[in-house]
Amino acid sequence: MIACRPSVVAGWLRAEGFTLLELLVVVALISLLALVIPPAFFNDSTREFNKAVDSALLMLRRARLEAVMERRSSNVIFPKAPAEADLQNSWFHEGIEVKISGNDVEPQPQIAQVRFFPDGSSTGGILDFKGQLLKRRILIQPESGRIQIEQEQ
């Protein structure tokens, strides 16, 4: 039988606190969890919001192309209520608010609207899409009718 020195055994029994290595392991685990958990909660809502705004962007581009190709004006309407969303070329998504600013047409309280003309121009404006936590902006140039998404900062 090997006998331990009493001072070593007593030293281990009196040790309090954590070693530096233990603290580093705990901090590393907490930081990994902080990186993994938030995207799991917000990823679905972000993806759904981006899909909805992309569908509005597609509808705007299709209306512009339709106006030029068919040589007639084409509208895209963004109603504030689902009952008004039955119109052709209307876009509505529950939980996303759309506001338009900076266009030549007088703003209507219930409906935001963009009109494209046969020469490729439009009423123009800035469409702001706002969800609970997310925002995106689509810019429409009046002279050229060019449509672009403002880059997120």
Image: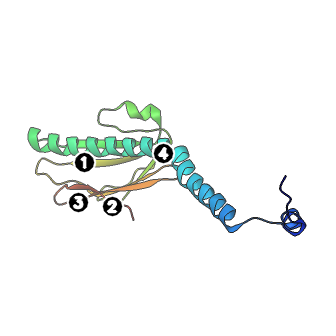
Please tell me how crowded label 3 is: few (under 14), some (14-19), or many (20+) other residues with Cα within 10 Å.
some
Is 38 in front, or is 6?
Answer: 6
Do the residues under discs 4 and 2 have CB atoms within 8 angstroms? no
Disc 1, SS: strand
Please tell me how crowded label 1 is: few (under 14), some (14-19), or many (20+) other residues with Cα within 10 Å.
many
The x and y percentages for residue 17 are 80, 66
Do the residues under discs 4 and 1 have CB atoms within 8 angstroms? no
Mark identifier at residue 141: 3
Q: Earlier in the sequence, mark 1 or mark 2?
A: 1
Residue 110 lies, with reference to residue 138, above or below; the image says above
Q: CA distance from mark 2 to mark 3?
A: 16 Å
Q: Earlier in the sequence, mark 4 or mark 1?
A: 4
Q: Amino acid at mark 3?
A: Gln
Nearer to us of marks 4 and 2 is 4
Disc 3, SS: loop
The x and y percentages for residue 45 are 49, 43
Mark identifier at residue 115: 1
State which quarter of the image contains the C terminus.
Answer: bottom left
The x and y percentages for residue 117 are 16, 48
Q: Amino acid at mark 1?
A: Arg
Is 4 in front, or is 127?
Answer: 4
Q: Amino acid at mark 4?
A: Asn
